[in-house]
Image: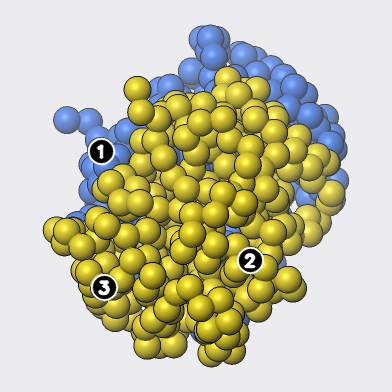
Chain colours: A blue, B yellow
């Protein structure tokens, strides 16, 4: 099992790469090919758009690569997602793609293009408290399809997204068909008024209203409001589900933390 | 000329209300009816949704009111905008509605419903450095349709929005027809990566691509990135205009500041 790591958003830390390689060496059940592009830097990004795109296209087209693991989130994968999906080589269709957060732009577009994608922990997560377990969980899914890595609550096909990422891909060519899926949503580092506004945007969208249920992952690192917002993230989700008529499916075990579980994307097959 | 002030988003400061009333008294060409709801408080909002909606519906339906002036932005008008526009009374159609920032949710929906709306300074702006001039400019438009209050650069019909507000109303029932309009966009208190992401979302939207041009207002109070983003707001706008094929029309004299000009909404009449 050969896993390629590329960074379509922000650069991977050297110490994160070393820590993940140490975990992989100890496991002995896979090989991790960390692309040099992961350490490129260009302002906010892991190298310019062209370099990030070239590295991603390279590993997608490489028949010796069994899985593509996105190094970390941040911001920037949306800038190259459409180009990454143009004229897909056959080799791109026989591998798994995994990541979360900003990588959701790619997961969405790749799933829409028929590729096999999953929400799940990324190499950079090794830097979190308890991050070794997150990396082991991700590898257990990538290498062994170990069901204990999965978020366990879904009833049928599911997808998972960061709220801000999903809000920003609605109406774009990356938007996947959400018909009949359990939609798991988490958020991080936003004000609650922004979360409320994003939920307005999301639940007013006809394509989101086709989802079977919305489930709420963790909303972490909430930014302080100048006055207390007045409600919490659960009330916000329940409110917008009630207003829009989308069933609220309760909590989901995903988020920007070491406990983040794996959610393989699958659309409803009728 | 009787102008009603209501607060569909966040509460108006008492000292702002007093300062604006003093300006109005000195002018002697209009009467300002500041609705008590402006001073309500419920968590983040100027009272619960029901109270904000009732005050707005009340002044919209009041035939003695010539203009409705939104007290301030913040967040929350989207929560009541659809209900505000249901079963419009005739009296609602013979008045001007003015505000900006979060009030853009209402401006969009009201314009779509055929009401007369304009982007422009609000009562709370009197608290800004140089804010008296902003309030005088707004009143010069509301009372006298004084052309010196206008943003001067548009070639044809125009609309103006805060970037985050516009991004969050795309695909919702509030989205107006942008065909052939000069679209003026400003932003405040966001990171540049967020501005870049919002511009991706915006310019990937088929309805935004119908606009004649995008013009860039001021991007104020930019939040610090942990590494420098690498470009500025002008480069971001030019980049997304180039990628999407929407003409970039240069800078616009609007923003979250005392210099903010008035932009009456108008769709292209073919």
Q: Vertical placement of A29 versus A84: above or below?
A: below
Q: Residue at x 73, y 61 (%)?
A: B221
Mark 1: give few (<14), some (14-19) or many (20+) Cα within 10 Å: some
> Relative to B191, is B168 on the left or the right?
left
- Chain identifier of the residue bearing label 3 in the image: B
Closest to the observer, B217 or B138 = B138
Judge depth for marks 2 and 1 and give the one in front: 2
> Relative to B1, is A20 on the left or the right?
right
Gap in Å between the C-alphas at discs 2 and 3?
25 Å
Residue underneath mark 2: B134
Mark seen at residue B64:
3
**How many numbered marks are there?**
3
- Chain identifier of the residue bearing label 2 in the image: B
Residue A225 picture quarter: bottom right
- Chain identifier of the residue bearing label 1 in the image: A
Q: Vertical placement of A51 versus A222: above or below?
A: above
Mark 3: give few (<14), some (14-19) or many (20+) Cα within 10 Å: some
Furthest-front residue in this view: B28
Q: Position of residue A73 (x, y in %)?
A: 65, 46
Find out whether the residues at labels 2 and 3 contact each other: C-beta distance under 8 Å: no
Mark seen at residue A179:
1
């Amino acid at each position: 099992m050969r896993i390629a790591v590329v960074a379509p958003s922000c650069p991977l830390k050297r110490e994160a790469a070393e820590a993940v390689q140490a975990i992989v060496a100890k496991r002995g059940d896979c090989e991790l090919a960390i692309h040099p592009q992961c350490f490129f830097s260009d302002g906010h990004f892991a190298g310019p758009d062209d370099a990030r795109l070239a590295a991603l296209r390279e590993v997608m087209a490489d028949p010796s690569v069994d899985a593509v693991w996105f190094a970390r989130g941040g911001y920037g994968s949306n800038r190259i997602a459409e180009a990454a999906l143009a004229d897909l080589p056959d080799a791109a269709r026989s591998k798994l793609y995994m990541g979360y957060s900003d990588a959701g732009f790619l997961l969405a577009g790749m799933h829409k293009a028929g590729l096999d994608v999953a929400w799940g922990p990324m190499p950079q997560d090794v830097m979190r408290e308890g991050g070794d377990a997150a990396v082991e969980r991700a590898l257990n899914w990538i290498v062994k399809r170990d069901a204990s890595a999965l978020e366990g609550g879904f009833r049928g096909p599911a997808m998972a997204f960061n709220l801000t990422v999903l809000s920003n891909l609605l109406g774009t060519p990356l938007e996947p068909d959400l018909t009949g899926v359990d939609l798991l949503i988490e958020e991080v580092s936003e004000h609650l008024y922004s979360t409320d506004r994003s939920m307005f945007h999301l639940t007013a969208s006809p394509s989101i209203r086709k989802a079977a249920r919305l489930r709420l992952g963790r909303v972490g690192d909430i930014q302080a409001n100048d006055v207390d917002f007045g409600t919490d993230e659960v009330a916000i989700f329940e409110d917008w589900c009630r207003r829009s008529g989308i069933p609220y499916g309760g909590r989901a075990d995903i988020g920007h933390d070491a406990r983040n579980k794996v959610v393989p994307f699958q659309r409803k097959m009728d």
